[in-house]
Structures are given as C-alpha cells and as structure tokens.
Image (tube, rainbow, N blue to C red):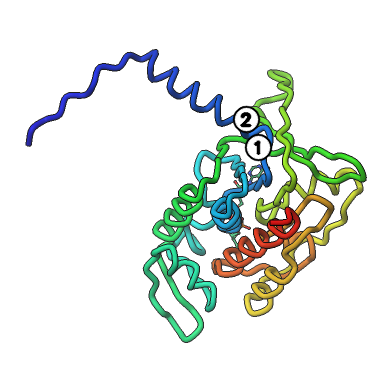
Amino acid sequence: MVIPMFDKVDEKDVTRAIMESFSKEFQESAESDVIIVGGGPSGLMAAKELASRGVKTLLIERNNYLGGGFWIGGYLMNKVTVRVPAHKILEEIGVPLQKYSSGLYVTSGPHACSKLIAAACDAGTKILSMTRVDDVVLRENNRVAGVVVNWTPISALPREITCVDPVALESKLVIDGTGHDAEVVQALVRRGLMKIKGYGAMWVEKSEDAVVEHTGEAHPGLIVMGMAVSTVYGLPRMGPTFGAMLLSGKRAAEIALDLLGK
Ligand code: 48F
C-alpha cells in the first residue's frame, strides 16, 4: 500500500474551520420554520420528513449523540422491535428487518438508529448538539414562537460557580420530542398555561395507537410527539417497541406542514 501524505494544515486552520462553519450555521439557526426539541426516534423522523420537504428545520439535542432511546431495546439488549405497519419506514431507509411474528419485526438498534440519523441529516436537518432547551419564547396570546437554550454543561454547574444567561432561537413552530419528560411542555405547565396528566402504566396494545392518534398541536405553536404525548395525555407507556415513535414523528411533520400552509 502506498501511504498517502496529508496536505499541509496548521492548528489555527483547524480551529478557524470549525469556528467559521459553526458560527455561520448558528447564525442561520436563529430563525427556523420548525424547531424540533429532542433527537430520539420521533424527533429524527419528524426532522427527516420536514427537511426533505424544504422546511427549514433545526433539531436541538442536549446530549452529544442523537438517537435517544433508539440505540438500544429493553433491558440493555441492543435489539429493537417495530410493529406492522411502521416496519415499512425502516425498510424504506434500508434497515434490514427480521420477522418475529405476523405483526412484529425485530432489528439491530445501532443499525436502525444510525440509518435514521443519516436520513435526517441527508434531508438537510440542521443539528445543535450539547444544547439544552430550558424555556420557550412566547408571543401574542401566549403562542410558542421559539425556544431558550444554553450549553448542556451549564446546567451541570452549581449556581454559585456560574450564572450564564441563555439565548433564544425563533421559529414558526416548535415540536416537543423530548420523550417521557416532555420538557418543552413543562415550560408551559410551570406558567399555568398547560395541564398534563403524566404517562400511564405499560400496555403496548393500547399505547401505540393512542400516541399516534393524540400527536398534534397541544398549545398554539407547540406540537407534541413521541412519548411526550403519553405524558401530556396520561396514555399508557409502551416499552421497547418503536413503531409509534416513527409514526408519531411522521404525523407531527404532517401537522406542521399543514400549519405552515405547505
Ligand atoms: O426519549 P427519546 O428516545 O424520545 P422519543 O422520540 O422516543 C421514546 C423511545 O425512545 C422510548 C419509548 C417508546 O419506544 O418508550 O423511550 O419520544 O428521546 C428524547 C430526546 O430528547 C432529548 C434527550 O436527550 C433524548 O435524546 N432531550 C430531552 N430533554 C431535552 C432534550 C431538552 N430539554 N433539550 C434538548 N434535548
């Protein structure tokens, strides 16, 4: 093998390349059509659907990795399940599936998750990682018009060491895909603008249909999807099966397109 020689580059070039590219993208992200909070399966699915239709979509994730609970199935075993008909979504993005029973497919969590991340990125989704949404922007009639963010590590620092003001990012719509915690919704609950029930006990047969059915605009400007829907409406949880997350993300995107008049 001929060992290739790298082109000459200084450390300062590496630093400037990162800085300039991030800064340009962050500046553009100050205003989006849709901000999706949470990069789990519902968030990635909604992002893929919206960005592929030309909607300016920003996905915000507090961790340094995307995927939420989709990397791994239940009980630290990295196999995930999907029920028919949601398996078609994974088939379309090239995830190999094994049929377990007439209505149930099983696949590798890492394979399914990485394909979905790639699909969201390929569609044109902009991603802000290590960024935590800790509040919302409200406008006339308490319409949600954006989110308030800070670097994730800031929230881990004791108040007596640092107090760093957050910044705001505006959007026409916000989608809460933060899972069981429903963190965007909680910002409205804290102000007495929404009431939530908390998610119910596990019952897969009921929960998947119910989550997809209840996915929608829960407050002006705010769509709720994924497990956040269970938390808002008191629906049963579903454990390590992900079809409803994919279909809920898809439905959230359809509702957003409708509200945007697209
Ligand atoms: O929890 P998560 O995977 O949400 P989901 O899309 O899917 C739920 C399933 O994984 C599973 C299940 C059903 O199959 O029971 O739990 O509803 O992903 C939520 C993502 O949101 C991020 C969090 O790190 C995770 O990646 N997140 C949560 N709060 C914030 C946030 C926040 N305040 N700011 C930014 N990201």
- The reply to whether dot 1 and dot 2 touch (C-beta < 8 Å) is yes
Q: Is mark 1 within 8 Å of ligand 1?
A: yes
* Callout 2 secondary element: strand
Q: Position of residue 113 (x, y in %)?
A: 46, 56
Between residue 127 and residue 180, name the one nearer to us: 127
Q: Is residue 62 visible?
A: yes
Amino acid carrying mark 2 in the image:
Trp
Left/right of residue 119 with respect to residue 219 in the rendered view = left
Left/right of residue 136 with respect to residue 66 in the rendered view = right
Who's the residue at 42% across and 56% down the image? 115
* Callout 1 secondary element: strand
Q: Position of residue 134 (x, y in %)?
A: 73, 37
Q: CA distance from mark 1 to mark 2?
A: 6 Å
Who's the residue at 68% across and 47% down the image? 34
Amino acid carrying mark 1 in the image:
Arg
Q: Which residue position is annotated with label 1?
A: 132
Q: Is residue 78 visible?
A: no
Left/right of residue 104 with respect to residue 143 in the rendered view = left
Residue lying furthest front? 262
Which corner quadrant of the image does residue 172 belong to?
A: top right
Who's the residue at 91% across and 41% down the image? 140
Left/right of residue 13 with respect to residue 188 in the rendered view = left
